[in-house]
Image (cartoon, helix red, strand yellow):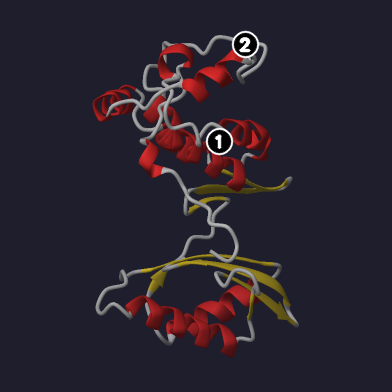
Amino acid sequence: MQTLRNLQGTKDSGNHWYALLVKIFRELRLKPNPVYRGVWHWHHEQGEAILCLATDDMLFGSTSKVLYDLLLAAFDKYFTYTTRTVTELSFLNYRIIQSEWGISIDQTTHIRQNILAKYFPDKTIKVPFQSSPFLLDNGVEMKIFEATDLSDKELSELAKIHRGGYSTWAGALLHIADKSRPDLSYAAMRLTGYNSTMFYNFATNHGLFVPSPSYSNHVFKKAGN
């Protein structure tokens, strides 16, 4: 379900909107997840329900349609909205499919549009098979250690060629690995290990690494400093 009007007005409009939803949910005796306040659980005599909130978009699943009707009746008192009760729907960048075999969640559209189309626009290019997706030559690590900074111009040119910095690639993989593709977790973890390498140009030799400027390093302070 989605509200018909976007959140507009003062800087506090988002906070007021959430306060209103909290008021409605508590009147219905929904309880917030103690870790993430965007998820609410409803234990009712007619069944169980879970509500996921993303600003003005909501995903609601219940074991009884009675709970769904009660929620809509409560919303009717405060604002207008639209609803969809179909076997396939979208929520954030997820695709959710309900069938007789269960419920599946994936990010197929997100991956195609934001990763494949962006970083691999030429569909005629095939990725060659290799025995390992990671570097096996120990000498590469020494080259990284000894390499000097790339110039701003070189960094800019590489970013254009590879459509962004290496951290952008790694971040895109980490997102889908965390949200819907746990099978990519190990590969994403290994690849992000090169985020701290801000100097050496891997792009020419490996087609992957576009370094960021050395001044963008993250600094982790010691306790007490």
Residue tagged 2: 130
Q: Is 98 left, or right, of 53 in this rendering? A: right
Where is residue 78 shown, x and y percent of the image? 40, 85
Q: Is 58 left, or right, of 102 in this rendering? A: left
Q: Identify the residue at horizontal 45%, vertical 24% (top origin).
A: 209
Where is residue 84 shown, x and y percent of the image? 48, 60
Q: Identify the residue at horizontal 31%, vertical 72% (top origin).
A: 7
Disc count in the image? 2
Figure check: 171 above or below 144: below
Residue 134's image quarter? top right
Q: What residue type is labelled 2?
A: Gln
Residue tagged 1: 192
Q: What residue type is labelled 1?
A: Thr
Where is residue 2 shown, x and y percent of the image? 42, 66
Mark positioned earlier in the residue sequence (2 or 1)? 2
Q: Is mark 1 on a helix, strand or loop?
A: helix
- Near mark 2 (Cα within 10 A), the count class, few <14, some 14-19 or many ≥20, is few
Q: Nearer the viewer, residue 93 or 210?
A: 210
Q: Identify the residue at horizontal 57%, vertical 77% (top origin).
A: 69
